[in-house]
Image (spheres, helix red, strand yellow):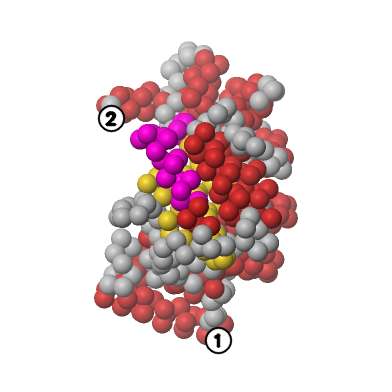
Amino acid sequence: MRAIAFLSALALFAPLQDGGDPEIEADRLYEVATSGSPRVRYQASVRLAGLGAVGTERVRAQLKRDEGYLGLGPALYEALVQFEDPSLRTELWESLGDERNPWRPAGARALAKEPKTEEAARFKALLQDRISAVRAEAIAGVAAGAEAQAIHALTPLLEDSNGRVRRRAAASLAGLGQHGALAWLLEDLRRDDSWFDMRLGRIARAEAAQALSALFGREALSSYTTRNSPDTEENRAAIAVLEERCKELAGESWPTLPDIARAPSHVEGEVIGIELRSCRFGEHLLRWTADDRLVIGEGDTHILALPKGATAELLVQAQAALEALDGERSFGDPGCDLERHHFMLPGEARSWTIQLTKGPEAVLDLRPAALDSLASAMIESASLVDNGARFKKLLTDTFEALGGPLAD
């Protein structure tokens, strides 16, 4: 298989032979860019852009069809800025205004790689987007603008609900001379939390270490190991040295971190969780604990009380769903939409996971009936907290975007 992949890559990057038909080559590259191995789609897209007018016309032929840019897929969509026709950049910006567009994070990332001065206001607007990946990608575009305006726009993101957004904002602000933002990155070096079996703390440590290495050089974190616990003697010592350096840079501007930025503690008693990650509706993470608490988000700062017995009722539904599925754990095909259920059953050391995945288009009856009933029960349970009515429509819309209409 590796040999076949290698030969395919050689064929992809082979130069156009003398006398070859550029239009045939454009068709070939378009096919690879939209339907080939995910590992080479972006490279094929860039090669297509390199064909000049012929490549542009091949893309424009797709944009004229009913499905428009949706038919390009995320790789070719992201590569639109590589084409010689500047109007494609304009069209890329316009497509970001379509909230039904599932490729918006890829578009924001492409535009932010080479931001234009006149686009500053548009990048700033993306910082309010409901999709955290769009907010995260837009940060680079904002940071490349006027310094004072960038600092003003990025500072509120230090309290964003998404950890990656906070880290990118902190790194950009530090790069703009706001050294107090380094406190956010240092704190993430101390994270060791998890969300069921997802090691969010390790992810946070790796991203924070990468950002700090970019700011200070690799040698500054040479004795810090992200795969090890932050409580090891070596890691504690490395953090202490780096903290002293950061505080010296920040001086009196060294901040007190808000709760959202502090390394989360372990949430005791989590028994049911749901990850909803929609390429159109954003992401929502909810956990139910055995002592009837609803934990919203990836951390421990948004915990709401449920009526007594609410989690036990939901756990009965979860166990019934597991039995009805009779061993099936995965439904659909890989894509940008994900619905993942987590169950920690009594007496078991690890959680059960069931997931639905798909692309941006609706898939009829993707969610099995057993999970359909459970999803409805989750929505009703979440609506039991104070001011919970606001969750109901949001969760219903997201569940239905991911797995199809819920039964009445």
Range covered by the magenta-colored residues: 314-335
Whether pointer 2 and pointer 1 mark residues with C-beta atoms closer than 8 Å, the reply is no
Q: In this rendering, would 180 be left or right of 394?
A: left
Residue 275 position within the rendered picture, expressed as x and y whole percent measured from the top left? 50, 49
Numbered tag placed on residue 2 in the rendering: 2
Given the image, on which type of amino acid does mark 1 rest? Answer: Glu
Residue appearing at x 53%, y 18% in the figure: 27
Q: Residue at x 45, y 21 (%)?
A: 16
SS assignment at label 1: helix
Q: Quadrant of the C terminus?
A: top right
- Does the segment drawn in magenta span residue 17? no
Location of mark 1 (residue): 252
Front one among 307 and 267: 307
Instruction: Using the rendered image of the protein, determine whether residue 170 is visible from the camera's viewpoint.
Output: no
Please state, as top left, top right, bottom left or bottom right, where the N terminus lies in the image: top left
Closest to the observer, 40 or 117? 40
Relative height, residue 212 to residue 91 (above, below): below
Query: Residue at point 52% right, 43% down?
Result: 374
Q: x and y percent of residue 218 in the render?
A: 35, 65
Q: Is residue 316 magenta?
A: yes
The percent coordinates of residue 365 (x first, y second) are: 55, 29
Q: Residues within 10 Å of mark 1 (few under 14, many from 20)?
A: few
| Mark 2 residue element | helix
- What is the x, y in percent for residue 316? 46, 48
Q: Looking at the rendering, which quadrant does residue 304 occupy? A: bottom right
The answer to whether residue 54 of the structure is visible from this angle is yes
Reply above or below: 76 against 171: above
